[in-house]
Image: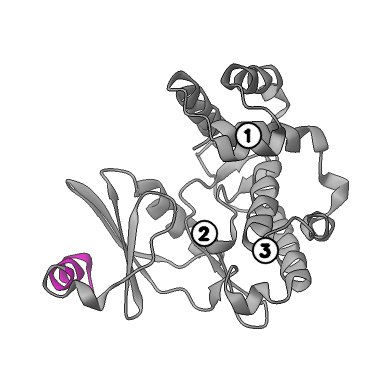
Amino acid sequence: MDIKSLLELFRKSPELFLDTSGRSGAKTYCYQDYYLKIGKKHELEAEYRALIYFSKYNYSQAALEYSSSERDYLLTKRMSGMCSCAPKLISNPEILAVTLGKLLRKFHDTKFTEAISINHNEEILKRVFLNYQQANLDEQMTQGIGCLELDEVFSYINAKKDILVEDTVIHGDYCLPNIFLDQDYRFCGFLDMGRAGVGDRHYDLFWGRWSLAYNLGNDKYGDLFYEAYGNEVIDPERLKLIAYIACLDG
């Protein structure tokens, strides 16, 4: 199966495809054992390269094909297991929180032998500055920091941005829909790694806890998630900075 064949089938029989699109803006369709992701031109190139890279370490599925014309198309095999927000896995939040914490620490501690060129800190600060210029403030995220003023949020980020470090390779979108586990909470793979790169571990830590709370409906297990990861390497000041960054990182 290739992209051309799937697109022809999709145009003729769209009812055969299941729409599994997330919040990234790209559209993702599932057909049998394949995922076809469709995005804006050049939007999926970074994810394609990331899948090639991380599949060598068994952290993701290998990319089968990528093409770019008026739009981008990315073809992968279906991931085994289920996303971490599946009812089966959420039914035991303690095990889930511990699993996600330990998994993230293992990923961050992995010694990748090949260099990664993407500097995640630079990329997020570019997005922050652009969203500030366009006054794109995420009001949902501002509720978490108790600050609703655009200028105040940006001023805090600008004053504190130098405390960000490049201490590990991060996922860049460590949220429950992107983490696949089997029914016994064993790791199967990551999805949506287009924002992976060298950056600050607290970015993944913040979004991992936020996503866990969002999907459970409360933050009761957030501390357990951090404990499983290792509180000894978690810096509250950098976590606070990421919380502010999240308000302008859409």
State the image coordinates of residue 60 (x, y, percent, origin top left): 50, 65
Task: Give the Cα separation between the discs numbered 1 and 3.
Answer: 20 Å
Q: Earlier in the sequence, mark 2 or mark 3?
A: 2
State the image coordinates of residue 236 (x, y, percent, origin top left): 81, 37
Task: Say what amino acid the circle numbered 3 marks.
Answer: Leu
193 sits to left or right of 113: left
153 sits to left or right of 133: right
Q: Is residue 185 visible?
A: yes
Image label count: 3
Residue marked by disc 2: 54
The secondary structure type at the circle numbered 3 is helix
Q: Are marks 2 and 3 in contact (CB under 8 Å)?
A: no
The secondary structure type at the circle numbered 1 is helix
Of circles 2 and 1, which is in front? 1
Tell whether position 3 is magenta.
yes
Looking at the rendered image, the quarter that the N terminus falls into is bottom left
* Identity of the residue drawn at 58% across and 33% down: 247
The secondary structure type at the circle numbered 2 is helix
Q: Residues within 10 Å of mark 2 (few under 14, many from 20)?
A: some
Task: Give the Cα separation between the discs numbered 2 and 1.
Answer: 33 Å
Numbered range of the magenta stretch: 1-10
Q: Are marks 1 and 3 in contact (CB under 8 Å)?
A: no
Q: Earlier in the sequence, mark 2 or mark 1?
A: 2
Residue marked by disc 1: 142
Q: Residues within 10 Å of mark 1 (few under 14, many from 20)?
A: many
Task: Say what amino acid the circle numbered 1 marks.
Answer: Thr
Tell me if residue 220 comes above or below residue 2 in the rendering. Answer: above
38 sits to left or right of 83: left
The numbered disc on residue 152 is none
Tell me if residue 24 comes above or below residue 236 in the rendering. Answer: below
Between 196 and 204, the residue placed more toward the observer is: 204
